[in-house]
Image (spheres, grey):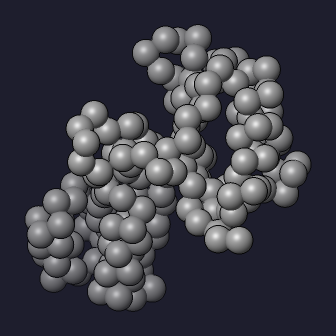
Amino acid sequence: MEIKKRCISLYVENRIGVLAKISGLLSGKSYNLDTLTVGETEDPTVSRMTIGMTMDDVTFEQVIKQLNRCVVVIKVIDFTEVPIHKKELLYIKVSSCSEKDKAEVFRLAKVFSLDIIDYDRNHIIVQCVKTEDANNDMIALFNKTFINRVEVVRGGSVAIEAVSTQER
């Protein structure tokens, strides 16, 4: 059985306990989630979850069936084989910065289209909104450049189906 990365989107009721119910349903069956992001939609009574997971086809089918049976789930969309736009938020903080270090961070920010969102005399924080792979590359680059001085915070991916026929 081939294990591969999956991405699904759920429309769920925007009520207290729904996130816990969905994550509990999945963790109770020992399914591991790579990412889970949730936010309110254009309709304040509905939230949208984007879930990333790595699993085989049979297990994935079971997950989809269980989610479709869940009362609070309005709709399940499988993005695994669909052209989508998918990004995640990443913050990188570099500590103990010299002026040379800060200049290097500003250079990297310019080259890689990152945003400097905060800094002081000794620290600088960069925001990166890219794909998971691109963010992994950024983390590796910053770790290599600023050894033992990097703090990373990342959010799960959000995704939406592409409107053009080209995959993003």
Position of 59 relative to 140 (above/below): above
What residue appears at the point 61 percent right and 25 percent down from the top-left corner? 75
What residue appears at the point 41 percent right and 52 percent down from the top-left corner? 88
* Number of disc labels: 0
Q: Nearer the viewer, residue 8 or 112?
A: 8
What residue appears at the point 83 percent right and 41 percent down from the top-left corner? 25
Q: Residue furthest right?
A: 28
In the picture, residue 96 is in which quadrant?
A: bottom left
Left or right: 118 with respect to 147? left
What residue appears at the point 76 percent right and 56 percent down from the top-left corner? 59
In the picture, residue 158 is in which quadrant?
A: top left
Location of residue 53 in the rendering, given as x and y in whole percent from the top left corner: 63, 57
**Residue 156 in view, yes or no:** no
Left or right: 70 with respect to 143? right
In the picture, residue 160 is in which quadrant?
A: top left
Location of residue 57 in the rendering, given as x and y in whole percent from the top left corner: 68, 58
Location of residue 105 in the rendering, given as x and y in whole percent from the top left corner: 20, 72
Q: Nearer the viewer, residue 168 or 131?
A: 168
Location of residue 9 in the rendering, given as x and y in whole percent from the top left corner: 55, 37
Image quadrant in which the N terminus is located: bottom right
Q: Nearer the viewer, residue 83 or 137?
A: 83
**Residue 152 in view, yes or no:** yes
Position of 73 relative to 152 (above/below): above
Left or right: 12 with respect to 101? right
